[in-house]
Image (spheres, rainbow, N blue to C red):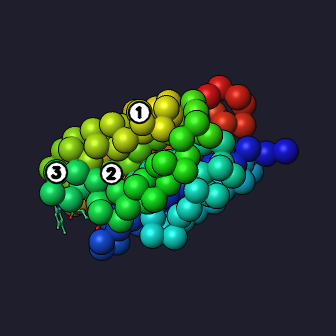
């Protein structure tokens, strides 16, 4: 059976969604994984439980992750305790600046779930999303093939 990749993201505008679409399309295109794609507002503990690995995407807001993605983590954190230990994850961020605040905040939260970050965070400036979709596709492909080959 194919492993499952969960992609959860929030976007206030369109940019992080554009990144997510490229990631999802590439992951699906590998035919190596099943993909669950969720807006952060709709994502649940069941989605986390059903997946073998995760990609989380957000715009940077006020130097951190978006409120909606934070809400997802807040809703699932306690129910997930002890259930999802060691699962691999990656981060993608769209930001006006360097995105480091959003990345650090997600990494800190993920330590609480005891997840393992298996890809370097992908941060793309707001002005460059359309120019750098290949990097999103690479992240989706790498995560999918890594899960399927048991590398992670
Ligand atoms: C309320 C708000 C706060 C923001 N704060 C930051 C910030 O702290 N650092 C930053 O680099 N960009 C910040 N931005 C800019 C967004 O990260 C940037 O516009 C991003 O491309 C939006 O992506 P989206 O189209 O997916 O919503 C902020 C945007 C909004 C709306």
* Circles 3 and 1: CB atoms closer than 8 Å: no
SS at badge 1? helix
Q: Earlier in the sequence, mark 2 or mark 3?
A: 3
Instruction: Let me know if residue 48 appears in the view.
Output: yes
Percent position of residue 51, x then y: 66, 48
Asked if the residue at label 2 sits under 8 Å from ligand 1, the reply is: yes
Task: Please name which of the two marks, 2 or 1, marks the residue nearer to the observer.
Answer: 1
Give me the C-alpha separation between circle 2 and circle 1: 18 Å
Residue matched to label 3: 63
Front residue (pair 85, 103): 85
Residue matched to label 2: 93
Task: Please name which of the two marks, 2 or 3, marks the residue nearer to the observer.
Answer: 3
Asked if the residue at label 3 sits under 8 Å from ligand 1, the reply is: yes
Give me the C-alpha separation between circle 2 and circle 3: 12 Å
Which of the 4 image quarters holds residue 19? bottom left
SS at badge 2? strand
Q: Quadrant of ligand 1?
A: bottom left
Q: Is 107 situated left or right of 2 in this image?
A: left
Residue matched to label 1: 111
Percent position of residue 141, x then y: 59, 44
Which of the 4 image quarters holds residue 143? top right
Residue shown at the point (20%, 59%) measured from the top left: 61
- Identify whether 53 is placed above or below 16: above
- Identify whether 24 is placed above or below 102: below
Residue shown at the point (40%, 55%) measured from the top left: 74
Residue shown at the point (58%, 36%) measured from the top left: 82
Percent position of residue 126, x then y: 23, 60
State which quarter of the image contains the C terminus.
top right
Percent position of residue 2, x then y: 79, 45
């Amino acid at each position: 059976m194919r492993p499952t990749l969960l992609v959860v993201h929030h976007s206030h505008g369109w940019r992080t969604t554009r990144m997510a679409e490229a990631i999802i399309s590439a992951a699906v295109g590998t035919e190596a994984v099943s993909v669950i794609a969720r807006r952060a507002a709709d994502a649940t503990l069941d989605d986390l439980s059903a997946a073998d690995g995760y990609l989380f995407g957000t715009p940077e807001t006020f130097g951190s992750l978006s409120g909606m993605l934070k809400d997802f983590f807040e809703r699932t954190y306690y129910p997930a305790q002890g259930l999802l230990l060691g699962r691999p994850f990656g981060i993608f961020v769209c930001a006006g600046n360097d995105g480091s605040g959003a990345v650090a905040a997600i990494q800190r939260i993920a330590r609480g779930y005891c997840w393992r970050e298996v890809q370097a965070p992908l941060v793309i400036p707001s002005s460059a999303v359309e120019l750098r979709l290949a990097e999103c596709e690479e992240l989706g492909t790498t995560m999918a093939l890594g899960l399927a080959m048991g590398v992670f």
